[in-house]
Image: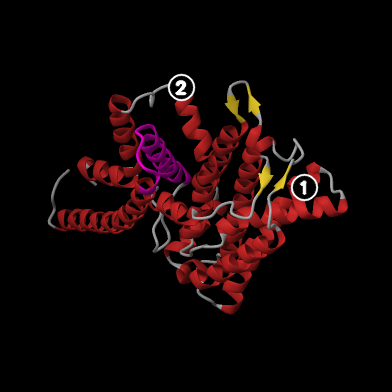
Amino acid sequence: MKTSTKIQLALLNNLVWVMVAVFFLANALFTPSFLSARNQLNILFQSATLGLMVLGQGIVMMVGELDLSMEATLAFAPGITILLANRFGIPAPVCLLLTLLIGALVGCFNGLCMVKLRTNSFLLTMSTQIVMRGLVLFLVPFSLAKLDPVYTFLGRGKIGNLQVAVLVLILIYAVFEFLFRMTTAGRRFLLTGGNRKAAFISGINTDRVLVSAFMLAGVLASVAGLITAGRQNAVSNNMGTGLVMMAFAGAILGGCSFNGGLGKPIGMLGGTLLLGMLDNALTLNGVDVNLVSATKGALIFVAILLDRLRFQLTAWIMHRENIRRLTGGGD
């Protein structure tokens, strides 16, 4: 393969980081206070919740499915946990584990329903999302405040000047980048999403991979719920509202595809940072909150177009490379 072709493919596969660099430099020059260390840490801190949602959504998209229920899981897992803790006096450390368990069970339910009933993941998780949000609105009509410091540590704790939420975000992304890049188990997700029948024929338990993807999404959504609850020192019934669409945008910008079989955590982190910087830059420039919302909606549209454009350009580059080989073209 020609060196120029390799460079073109590498740029397409890492396009989000090119966008992050361009956007960062533009705001460093034209947005007041954007470049300050305090603001950069603030971007990371504010992006922690979204980053976990993007990663969870990206993992599900890797296997060729969608999960609309993540934003409801973000509120449902900590909401049910705190209600149980208040009723039965459950210790805060156990509450942390219980929150993660509830998220995993929600994901397991979604995954099992999809593989056993052969239902559409979009419709299935949309119904799960509506049910969980309704239960949270019913069970938590008012905010559950004054949480135990252990329970809020992920959202409010600091190590020096660095928020624990930022460290958690970086650590989780590093772990998943290693798993998907270096382990056979991680590569099974991409193989399942790329061609499910071929993956099954080759010996991969595709049903188990699908259920695992939804369970991971549920756990990551519950961690995002812990960070959100810790940040505001309360569990409210509107936590996570509207985040699922931004999670889609971040995952697509980061290299995932609605067709499945594509994506890597480092790219999803780039998508998260791009969205975080956009929100921060618009706020620093005093843009009206309604225009911020409109801009985010436009970015989702751009992400969808980018997904299609990236697929077409990759196909065209590979087609051109195959023709070059067949005609005996040199390097």
User: What residue is drawn where x is 32% and y is 30%?
Assistant: 27
Q: Position of residue 241 (x, y in %)?
A: 53, 55
Tell me how the rendering is colored.
Answer: secondary structure
Taking depth in this image into account, of 99 and 14 the one nearest to the observer is 99
Above or below, 193 relative to 157 = below
Q: Which residue is mark 2?
A: 37
Q: Is residue 72 left or right of residue 77?
A: left
Residue 85 x, y percent position in the rendering: 81, 50
Q: Position of residue 105 (x, y in %)?
A: 69, 61
| Nearest to the observer: residue 311 or residue 222 | 222
Q: In the rendered structure, which disc, 1 or 2, sits on the residue that comes first in sequence?
A: 2
Residue 315 among magenta residues: no
Quadrant for residue 315, please give it.
bottom left
Q: Main secondary structure of the magenta part?
A: helix
Label 2: element kind:
helix
- How dense is the environment of label 2, judged by Cα within 10 Å: few (below 14), some, or many (20 and up)? few
Residue wearing tag 1: 95
On screen, 294 above or below 35?
below
The residue drawn where x is 28% and y is 54% is 310
Magenta segment boundaries in residue numbering: 265-290
Mark 1 vs mark 2, CA separation in Å: 34 Å
